[in-house]
Image (spheres, rainbow, N blue to C red):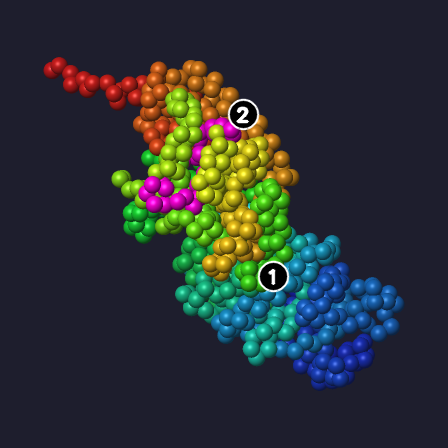
């Protein structure tokens, strides 16, 4: 393979007009009269002309292809048409040009040069000065420059031209061609540095390149081509001479490289981050772009070393012109290697490549930083998860797990509609309910419509606990009573008031005096299905001097073991509660948003009419957002006692998420899927139960399923076996949990996009675990054999 040329234009000496000749050309071709000053240019001649109207005259290299000059003129016009505020110099038409203003050839005049021609062009001269050293720019200027770069990229998005497909060594797209010219770099240490950088580029960037966003870009938004005022604000973008079809992020890399010139090593990451902030005001970066930004900056620095050296080998002047640039490029390359490219990527917001910290190390840090009160990690081998997509979770080693546990990402992890809705809204505005905003009203109105008659008022908060806490306050204010009722092993949240209504989290022996619990009927073990125990709990409460203010119920009894509630029974307990003066709180944090597959809200399946409904967990598909829905008469009584405001409650980003979730539940027919997949899953589990005596009962509705793990042949709960099963499944790539007071019920509660094939996989893996479990458990319970000699 023959070596790539340094660039045909870069290898031919620039034109060499005198000042007088240039002044004559300006006058004769464009009618411009004024003082002429030449400015440095790598391959053209450029003259500033101080006449009536300040202008810049460019005399192109004889090797320059005129269609590239046409592309420059068209691009400058296109950019300003799209974004009229962009400070991009416009070309002047040659007076009397036959093609008229639509013909790009009308913006250049040819003068003979040996066997070829120099093309002469006149551009508006923009205010400001060029070649400000990166280190001299303040943070505002750094940011502003990057924002203008992003605007230019956006303005050129729809522009194309055949001449844009070219090979430019300054464009990192062609970085590896620099290897052909490494021999021109005489300093061995510097040559080694460039070689290492290019090797890194080849392994990390080259494979990613085809996936990068690409378009026609400026390619070289360095200080030589960007004019700024005294404050550093951009006043002009000039010299589109390096334009090419390349990765969009290359423009940003050219800005970063320029900004880093002359900076101390400890300012490199910070300056890059500020540059990125400025760019992302207009164009958010894609993860891959962020990941390789350091390598792209380094590729430009390599060009900064190699191209001048290669040109110096061709003719002497170029070397002197680029000497400063070259030494700064070497310093920057050294600094990037010192920081480390992976480190750099991570510190500017990308992800670490490779494994990173060990699970044991992270667990130790968690213990130390987050303390002992935080709940333990799931599974004997804790998971370090780094990514989620649909029903799948991925750990730091890239292993994937079927998520049959997490109900919060109700539409699946990272649902694009929710993520995008939130990101768009976060970019646009995020405030609070002291200002008017439409989305919160739309979400509230849709919730009211979905909850049934009487429930007409919505208050937004940020977690299930807060929703229940607020519901409890409303109940207290509305009834004037102090007592509360909940199921025997319920969990409703973390606030002081709601922890009292959460026996699952009570300390041993704890039993708040104003709370009474009732055991929901356990059909599997044949417990009495009557309402006597509930009525008894009310009686005890009254006897203790606490008239009941509210009874709270999770419609799918998640913490009590995912028990099937009989609708008739449910209606009767609600009636009894009302009769005793209590309000009914339907906690839909678990059962809501379509989990049961029959209705959006689980209480509707039971046919009961709650006074207050609380929502949480799945409401934002992972973003914290929660709500209380109640009747206006109750809200009024609450309002008489207090003024309610939650800083984050109902904020526009949370509401964008909530609306996207409601939309996607409808569009993706989530309820149908929850119903059919749930039925199929339970059928599969029951089939498994026929072979394995450890499965005592399979129950639930929609995609909330409980599996009783018992000692074979009995109904005795076996927590130990349930633990082994959960951990065995984890080791086989399936995530579930346990629930119930005895801790022996498998809790299977996946995102509602869980499909048939996922259910089949879960059942198959559970079968594998059960198969292996029998000997394992036998070994644990068998008497120890000490042997005989
Ligand atoms: N209610 C129920 C039924 C719950 O399961 C939970 C959480 N597990 C909550 C309320 C509390 O929600 P959060 O953790 O968002 O405060």
For the residue labelled by badge 2, is the local secondary structure a helix, a strand or a loop? helix
> Percent position (x, y) of residue 423?
57, 53
Q: Which residues are magenta?
A: 541-568
Closest to the camera, between mark 1 and mark 2, is 1
Q: Helix, strand, or loop for circle 1?
A: loop
As drawn, 558 above or below 763: below
Q: Residues within 10 Å of mark 2 (few under 14, many from 20)?
A: many
Question: Is residue 122 shown left or right of residue 195?
Answer: right
Front residue (pair 646, 338)? 646
Residue designated by label 2: 679
Considering depth in this image, is 376 or 303 the residue closer to the camera?
376
Instruction: State which tag comes first along the sequence, 1 or 2.
Output: 1
| Residue at 80% across, 77% down | 30
Q: Quadrant of residue 773?
A: top left
**For the point 44% across and 34% down, which residue is it?**
557
Count up the numbered dots. Answer: 2
């Amino acid at each position: 393979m023959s070596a790539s040329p340094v660039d045909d234009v870069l290898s031919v000496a620039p034109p060499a007009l005198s000042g007088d000749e240039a002044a004559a050309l300006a006058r004769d071709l464009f009618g411009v009269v004024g003082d002429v000053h030449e400015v440095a240019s790598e391959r053209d001649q450029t003259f500033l002309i101080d006449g009536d109207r300040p202008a810049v005259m460019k005399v192109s290299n004889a090797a320059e292809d005129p269609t590239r000059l046409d592309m420059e003129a068209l691009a400058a016009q296109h950019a300003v048409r799209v974004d009229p505020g962009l400070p991009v110099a416009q070309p002047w038409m040659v007076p009397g040009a036959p093609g008229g203003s639509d013909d790009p050839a009308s913006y250049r005049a040819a003068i003979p040069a040996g066997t070829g021609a120099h093309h002469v062009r006149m551009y508006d001269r923009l205010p400001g000065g060029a070649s400000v050293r990166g280190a001299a720019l303040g943070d505002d200027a750094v940011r502003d420059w990057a924002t203008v770069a992003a605007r230019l990229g956006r303005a050129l998005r729809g522009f194309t031209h055949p001449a844009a497909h070219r090979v430019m060594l300054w464009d990192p797209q062609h970085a590896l061609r620099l290897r052909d010219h490494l021999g021109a770099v005489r300093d061995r240490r510097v040559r080694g540095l460039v070689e290492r950088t290019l090797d890194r580029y080849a392994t990390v960037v080259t494979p990613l390149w085809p996936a990068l966003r690409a378009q026609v870009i400026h390619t070289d938004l360095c200080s030589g081509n960007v004019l700024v005022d005294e404050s550093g604000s951009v006043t002009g973008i000039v010299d589109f001479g390096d334009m090419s079809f390349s990765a969009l992020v290359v423009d940003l890399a050219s800005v970063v490289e320029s900004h880093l010139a002359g900076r101390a090593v400890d300012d490199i990451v910070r300056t890059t981050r500020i540059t990125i902030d400025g760019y992302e005001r207009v164009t958010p970066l894609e993860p891959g772009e962020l990941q390789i930004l350091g390598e792209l900056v380094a590729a430009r620095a390599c060009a900064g070393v190699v191209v001048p050296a290669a040109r110096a080998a061709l003719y002497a002047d170029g070397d002197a012109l680029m000497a400063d640039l070259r030494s700064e490029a070497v310093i920057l390359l050294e600094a990037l290697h010192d920081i480390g490219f992976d480190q750099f990527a991570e510190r500017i917001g990308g992800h670490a490549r490779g494994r990173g910290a060990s699970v044991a190390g992270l667990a130790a840090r968690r213990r130390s930083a987050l303390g002992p009160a935080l709940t333990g990690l799931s599974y004997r081998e804790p998971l370090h998860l780094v990514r989620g997509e649909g029903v799948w979770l991925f750990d730091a080693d890239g292993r994937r797990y079927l998520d049959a546990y997490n109900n919060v990402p109700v539409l699946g992890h990272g649902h694009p509609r929710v993520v995008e809705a939130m990101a768009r809204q976060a970019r646009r505005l995020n405030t609070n309910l002291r200002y008017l905003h439409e989305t919160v009203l739309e979400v509230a109105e849709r919730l009211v419509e979905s909850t049934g008659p009487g429930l007409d008022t919505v208050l937004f908060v940020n977690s299930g606990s807060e929703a229940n806490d607020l519901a409890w306050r409303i109940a207290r204010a509305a009834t004037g009573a102090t007592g509360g009722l909940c199921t025997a092993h319920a969990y409703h949240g973390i606030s002081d008031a709601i922890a009292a209504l959460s026996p699952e989290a009570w300390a041993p022996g704890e039993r708040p005096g104003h709370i009474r619990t009732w055991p929901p009927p356990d059909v599997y073990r044949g417990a009495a299905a009557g309402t006597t125990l509930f009525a008894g709990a009310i009686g005890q409460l009254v006897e203790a001097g606490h008239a009941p203010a509210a009874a709270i119920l999770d419609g799918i009894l998640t913490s009590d073991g995912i028990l099937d509630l009989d609708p008739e029974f449910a209606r009767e307990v609600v009636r009894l509660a009302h009769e005793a003066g209590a309000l009914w709180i339907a906690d839909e944090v678990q059962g809501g948003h379509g989990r049961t597959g029959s209705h959006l809200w689980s209480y509707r399946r039971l046919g009961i009419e709650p006074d207050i409904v609380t929502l949480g967990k799945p409401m934002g598909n992972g973003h914290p957002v929660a709500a209380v829905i109640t009747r206006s008469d109750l809200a009024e009584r609450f309002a008489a006692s207090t003024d309610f405001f939650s800083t984050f409650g109902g904020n526009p980003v949370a509401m964008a998420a909530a609306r996207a979730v409601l939309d996607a539940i409808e569009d993706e027919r989530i309820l149908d899927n929850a119903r059919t997949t749930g039925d199929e899953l339970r059928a599969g589990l029951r089939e498994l139960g026929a072979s394995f005596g450890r499965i005592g009962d399979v129950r639930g509705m929609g995609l909330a399923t409980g599996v009783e793990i018992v000692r074979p042949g009995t109904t005795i709960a076996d927590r130990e076996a349930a633990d082994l099963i959960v951990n065995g499944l984890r080791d086989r790539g399936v995530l579930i949990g346990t629930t119930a007071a005895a801790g022996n019920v498998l809790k299977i509660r996946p995102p509602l996009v869980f499909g048939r094939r996922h259910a089949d996989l879960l059942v198959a893996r559970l079968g594998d675990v059960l198969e292996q479990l029998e000997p394992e458990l036998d070994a644990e319970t068998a008497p120890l054999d000490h042997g005989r000699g």
